[in-house]
Amino acid sequence: MTSLFRRTAASFVAVAALVFAGAAVPASAAPPSPLNYVNFGDSYSAGWGAEPFVLPPAVNPDLQVPTCRIGGRPDQVTKFSRLNSVSLQGDYACAGATIGAPTDPNFPVPTIGQQIGKAALDGTLNASTDIVTLTAGGNDVGFVKFVETCAADTTPTAVECQAFAKAGDTAADNLAVQATIDEIHQVAPHAEVAWIGYPHIFALAGEPTTVLPGGGVMSAAAAAVFDAATTTLNETLAKKVGAADHAMFVDVTAKFTGHEVGSSDSWFALFAPSDPRSRFNLHPTTTGYAEGYFPAMVSQIKPAQLVRR
């Protein structure tokens, strides 16, 4: 028997043995099923500022409470849910939501805890939930009042704005972040919680994209205080989230650099510079959610790499 014949015969015998033993080369593995995803949060998770602008704002269809209002679509939650690796089970965010008690008793927006409770009742938040996202804390430290105070402060060093920022720092220290994450994990013990931060809103004098210092909403001094307070809030949230199990903080500030209010390519809604409280003002536009929040979420949460626990 020649060497070539011997090798050919041996190969045939080996292949035949595999076939008859039921050990043929397996077909390609089926793609993993999408991760179950639920969203909670305040206006920055509810598409506030995204087009189309509907007045009165739409009620969140998943929560169906008159005081739970949402902005336009698509926003970052919509885009994130369209990833092949993700399947949105419920979106309960409401503009104005707080971690603690509602800030306006006459218009009680469902709190983060109440959103979690509704999702648990619906069965969309459960033991099979893989990813939870939320933004929260901004309203607890007085976002709207902070804007009002800083916009009205004409002192050279924004003294009143600084005082409000200091009070906000104290409020941030007391945010019940761990308790909120624990509340989620009581219902969804395997979920990875992604607590998403807030962007700097104002372009400051000296930045290369600045058109108007402070963007025409508040003085440059006040805008600097406001952005610094945002940094402090993000740092506080990041520290608290970092101390919790199966939780991460998603920083979005870098994605918005060069796109603040007052820049030549702002990603923030600003309908009435003279009235900072105007509805939808100082929230990301559709572009801000798509080009700022969404890529920050994908790059830091990495849903395609998460392993179902």
Image (cartoon, grey):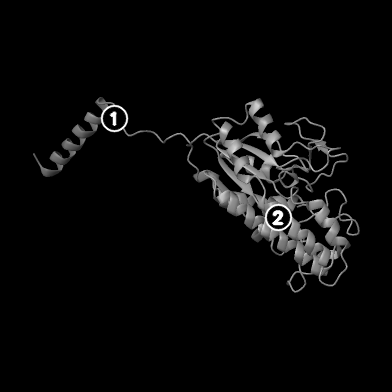
In the foreground, 307 or 224:
224
For residue 50, above or below residue 159: above
Task: Find the residue positioned furthest to the left.
Answer: 1
| Callout 1 amino acid | Ala
Asked if residue 201 can be seen in this view, the reply is no
Callout 1: SS: loop
| Callout 2 amino acid | Thr
Disc sitting over residue 170 in the figure: 2
For residue 168, above or below residue 129: below
Q: Quadrant of residue 214?
A: bottom right
- x and y percent of residue 68 in the render? 78, 36
Point 84% across, 67% down: residue: 219
Compared across the picture, whether 236 is left or right of 246 comes to: right
Task: Find the residue positioned furthest to the right.
Answer: 274
- x and y percent of residue 114 in the render? 70, 34
Task: Find the residue positioned furthest to the bottom.
Answer: 206
Disc sitting over residue 23 in the figure: 1
For residue 228, above or below residue 300: below
Give the Cα separation between the discs numbered 1 and 2: 65 Å
For residue 243, above or below residue 26: below
Point 79% across, 62% down: residue: 163
- Front position among marks 1 and 2: 2
- x and y percent of residue 171 in the render? 71, 52
In the foreground, 244 or 24:
244
- x and y percent of residue 82 in the render? 63, 40
Contact, mark 1 vs mark 2 (Cβ under 8 Å): no
In the foreground, 72 or 168:
168
Point 54% across, 30% down: residue: 127
Asked if residue 224 can be seen in this view, the reply is yes
Callout 2: SS: helix
Disc sitting over residue 112 in the figure: none
